[in-house]
Amino acid sequence: MRYLPLDAVDRAQMLTRIGAPDIDALFADIPAAKRLAALLDLPNGLGEIEVERRLTRMAGRNVAAGSVPFFLGAGAYRHHVPATVDHLIQRSEFLTSYTPYQPEIAQGTLQVLFEFQTQVAALTGMEVANASMYDGSTACGEAILMAHRVTRRRKAVLSGGLHPQYSDVAATLGAMANDKIVRLPLDPLAAEDVAAQIDDETSCVVVQSPDFFGNLRDLKPIAAAARAKGALLVAVFTEAMSLGAVRSPGEMDADIVVGEGQSIGNALNFGGPYVGLFATRQKNVRQMPGRLAGETVDADGRRSFVLTLSTREQHIRREKATSNICTNSGLCALAFSIHLTLLGEAGLRRVAALNHAAAVDLAERLGAIQGVSVLNDAFFNEFTIRTPRDAAELIDDLAARGIIGGLPVARLAPRAGLDDLIVVAATEVSTLADRQAYAEALAQCLQGGRKK
Amino acid sequence: MSARGAKEMNNQGRPTRPNAGDAPRRGTFTGNRALDMEEALIFETGRLDATGVDFDAPAPFVSKLGAHARDGAIGLPGLTEPEAVRHYVRLSRNNYSIDAGLYPLGSCTMKHNPRLNEKMARLPGFADVHPLQPIATVQGALELIDSLAHALLTLTGMSAVAMSPKAGAHGELCGMMTIKAALAARGEDKTRTVVLVPDSAHGTNPATAALIGFSVRAVPAEADGVVSAEAARAALAPDVAAIMLTNPNTCGLFERNIVDIADAVHAAGAYFYCDGANFNAVMGKTRPGDLGVDAMHINLHKTFSTPHGGGGPGAGPVVLSERLAPFAPAPSIVRNGPSLSLAEHSEGTPAFGRMSAFHGQMGMFVRALSYILSHGGDGLRQASEDAVLSANYVRASLVDLMSSPFGDRPCMHEALFDDRWLKDTGVTTLDFAKAMIDEGYHPMTVYFPLVVHGAMLIEPTESESKASLDLFIMTLRDLAMSALAGERERFVDAPIAAPRRRLDETRAARQPTLRWAKPAPA
């Protein structure tokens, strides 16, 4: 086996040193009746050629997003990631190191995390950010728990513009922790009055912008209403690229900002691994979950970085910790940070403008089709269309024509009565030809298809 | 570079002498020493108008951002591509890594990360696939998840697996939520509110239990480092929901009373959660399902070689017994003849809800399946045997010098020492660990498990050659004899050869500086 350096001679010599007659003597603590005599029912090991052949065959049964006109977002976005990013994150020293527990030999990772935290704080308009979470949805759940700790209340109100799976995660966590979660009905038109839902029991309101349907929302009045009742505003985004074009949640007075950072530096990966972003105000930092890198000096007085404020964490506090989280999404955070450094302020604004331009163009094309309407007033790179046919069928028809046309809302919310809605995204990687092809195919599907 | 960018971002410039005070000690003009280089922060070298990505501006169009458009600078510096490459390459060189040396962090399983796995995870058919594409366009992705699930169930002898948890601790949470859902279905979630956790458990275990409203009751281990069936029985009561037991445990020992404990737990109406962090010791040797386990997470980033990445991403699928299987969270894969689909909703089913958006850590699944296919059933068993053999070889080669808390008996895949042998040397476990850095090794896990004083937990893994193990052993013996000979300065000043000497961690915590801020004008 090519990954195992020991050979039979080595093993025999080692057993001799140990003083064990055979390898099974080392497993003597396993109750005899429970020891496996035969090999498990798995195939024997394969060489690289055969493993590659099998997995490539499996991969070939998927339609890669880059091989077709592609307009799906809804929490994960296809963007251009410079080749440099993937090259750098495969440096052995980043890829195959552990959590930086020994800072003297982990300054690379630690400085990257410090830079990442600063970038996330700047992007979100907040004072402080952590070293990342698993993904946006779990970061959102943790933000609610943090709001409960800060306010000493246990009721969260979730906007109807929140990604339905984010709401599912929060509701699951809430039900298990015996906290109250109020889910407002899905709100494609951004017409709900979230502020009216805040009462004296409310720890936080959770509002997404751009929301699940692509609407840009003004969080400022909601923040003010929350503050008036002693509650916090948790602002959520699933499209980090939007922050290159729209006002930051910090500018709109959010108390906690969480989001999905996949868009910057990370591939679609069929849903993971991604990178959760988490930012807040300095005064709440000790209630924040997750790893934090901080600046200090070494014994020679040189600037250095180290994991800090660990008295919040499970390995010190055990059942009294702020969270059970033990890791971050280090390599994905690195990819995020490298990509954002390559973009810089100028590049981020440029690519955000390209996203917006592509989406505006596509919305005009789709909205011009007979029977199709665009619901959004203000949007970034994603919007919602109402169609005269069942949206799920339409998306399948489009897929049969080689176009991934977006997300039928009913897939994530089957009982919401929104079976005619499709959430559509366009980014800098969509071409004019792609958008034209989509509009043509949609028009054809609607002409040929049965009316609702 | 515009004057504006330079003024706002580059007010220090790339320092040629980062800390003038260091220069005499380090003896160079730059403060660098050959390959050991200082590197400024991007906020000190980058410019607001510099970029490493070329895009043409969009043709003029009418914005739909409305009143939401951002105005004012964000404050994000950019670097051109050559500058960015140099920045990150230089930073990387300040990290220790498995690729560069033995990384014996106990309970972390720092084994070799095969590069074939990286190549496979980057196939466009896996990496460039969206989680919400039409099901007909992702049959290969579902097949991959289903194949990995099958392999995990075969290895563990369990009935079902929840694939979506994103890390070990997230898997623990998933497992305990499954148990809570099963209790609720029995109408006992309000009465069974206590979870038994041995003191030796990893901190995530009690933190997880507390997160979803359980209170934690400690179970003592015996003098030989394992939990006895009597101790478990004594702690069991009608208010107990579950026991969380790590096996092999954090002392590197197989919980040899595990079957009796499982029987007692089940007889008391509770569930058995097993922390599977140390599964690397027992692949193909025994199956948790045969031992009476109800739920166990598997760290794909430990046992199945997905890279640790400087602290994630991990993946923590949870295998479940037949009793718990119906309560597993969404999503799950459904087979309809030759085609696969996803059950993405829990409403109207016993499933307890959802752990995260989408379907789990697909990138890690590809790597783990690549690892499993490469090893096969025979290779996985050999990997576990070699891991256990290597740990025992290290243990047997050091036990005459260093003290072993539970006597001279075989361990599983990690060897645990305490600090009794350092008594009166003036050298602590931390000092010893830091001296290992100067010798070119990453230290072992120190001060964990908490139940052992000054713990040193060594996990060499199966990836080391005998020559590598022999040099490691000789190095530790040399250090140990040096400590015992009173050569304190080799330890208390260590490390002296690393990119940094010891850090002021107290200052970092007392005056937290968690982000860069523009220095006040001089």
Image (cartoon, rainbow, N blue to C red):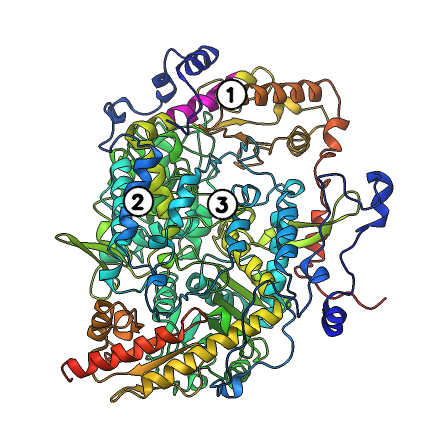
| Tag 3 subunit | B
Is B166 on the left or on the right of A306, as rendered? left
Q: How crowded is mark 1: few (under 14 residues within 10 Å), some or many (20 or more)?
A: many
Single out the mark in the foreground, 2 or 3.
2
Above or below A6: residue A289: below
Three-letter amino acid code at disc 2?
Leu
- Marks 1 and 3 share the same chain: yes
Three-letter amino acid code at disc 3?
Gly
Q: Is mark 2 on a helix, strand or loop?
A: helix
Q: What element carries label 1?
A: helix
Query: How far is mark 1 from mark 3, CA to CA?
Result: 25 Å
Where on the picture, by quarter, is residue A344? Answer: bottom right
Single out the mark in the foreground, 1 or 3.
1
Q: List x then y, in percent, for residue A76.
A: 40, 65
Q: Point out which mark residue A16 bears.
A: none
- Marks 2 and 3 share the same chain: no
Which residue is found at the position 25% from the left and 83% from the top?
A: A387
Circle 1/circle 3 CB separation < 8 Å: no
Residue A161: in magenta span? no
The stretch of residues the image draws in magenta is: B384-396
Q: Point out which mark residue B395 bears.
A: 1
Q: Point out which mark residue A55 bears.
A: 2
| Tag 2 subunit | A
